[in-house]
Image (cartoon, grey):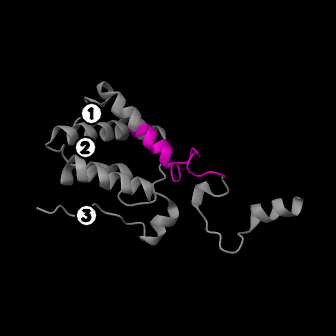
C-alpha cells in the first residue's frame, strides 16, 4: 500500500503524461484548476450570460473592438466582463497564446456570433496542457473568409 502511494507520488507509469497543475486528480473536468476545468469555464461564461447587467460598462477590449451584430456583441460583453471582473481574481493558467479569453474576443470580432461561438467552444474543449503542447502553445484565431 505505501509502496503504491510512493510510486504514484514520485514517478510516472508507462504511458502516463504530465498534465501540469491537474496531475493526479481523479476527474480533471470537475477539478477547480482552470487547465482541465472545462466545466468551470463554461459555468463562468454561462453565469455572465445570465447577468447581462454586470457585463455593461467595461468598454472596448484592447484585443479587438466590439463586433457589429447584436448576438456577437452580447457574447463579446460577456467575455469582456469575464476578462475584467472574473479573470483578475484567478491565477493565470491558460497554456495557449493568445489566452482563451483573448481568443474569444478576437473570434467574435472576426467571425461573428455563430462561427465565432463554434471556434470558442472548440478552443475551450482543447484548453489543456497536453493539447497545447501538441500545438506548440500557439493557437491563433483563423483568418476571416470574406
Quick check: 74 above or below 141?
above
**Who's the residue at 42% across and 66% down the image?**
137
Packing grade of label 1 (10 A; few <14, some 14-19, many >=20) is few
- On screen, residue 93 versus residue 13, left or right, reads left
The reply to whether callout 2 and callout 3 are in contact (CB within 8 Å) is no
Packing grade of label 2 (10 A; few <14, some 14-19, many >=20) is some
Q: Nearer the viewer, residue 87 or 71?
A: 71
Q: Nearer the viewer, residue 55 or 119?
A: 119
* Residue 135: quadrant of the picture: bottom left
Of the numbered discs in the image, which one, if any, rests on residue 61? 2
Question: N-terminal of the two: label 2 or label 3?
Answer: 2
**Image location of residue 45, percent across then percent down:** 39, 39
Mark 1, residue position: 58
Stretch in magenta: 26-45
- On screen, residue 40 versus residue 107, left or right, reads right
* Residue 48: quadrant of the picture: top left
Mark 3, residue position: 142
Quick check: 43 above or below 19?
above
Q: Nearer the viewer, residue 14 or 80?
A: 14
Q: Quadrant of the N terminus?
A: bottom right
**Image location of residue 19, percent across then percent down:** 58, 62
Q: CA distance from mark 2 to mark 3?
A: 19 Å
Amino acid at each position: 500500500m505505501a509502496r503504491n502511494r510512493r510510486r504514484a507520488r514520485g514517478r510516472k507509469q508507462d504511458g502516463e503524461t504530465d498534465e501540469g497543475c491537474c496531475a493526479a486528480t481523479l476527474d480533471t473536468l470537475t477539478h477547480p484548476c482552470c487547465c482541465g476545468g472545462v466545466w468551470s469555464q463554461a459555468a463562468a461564461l454561462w453565469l455572465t450570460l445570465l447577468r447581462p447587467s454586470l457585463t455593461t460598462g467595461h468598454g472596448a477590449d484592447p484585443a479587438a473592438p466590439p463586433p457589429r451584430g447584436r448576438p456577437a456583441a452580447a457574447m463579446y460583453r460577456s467575455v469582456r466582463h469575464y476578462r475584467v471582473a472574473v479573470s483578475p481574481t484567478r491565477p493565470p493558467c491558460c497554456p495557449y497564446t493568445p489566452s482563451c479569453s483573448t481568443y474569444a474576443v478576437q473570434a467574435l470580432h472576426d467571425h461573428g456570433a455563430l462561427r465565432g461561438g463554434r471556434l470558442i467552444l472548440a478552443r475551450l474543449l482543447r484548453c489543456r496542457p497536453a493539447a497545447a503542447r501538441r500545438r506548440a502553445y500557439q493557437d491563433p484565431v483563423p483568418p476571416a473568409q470574406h
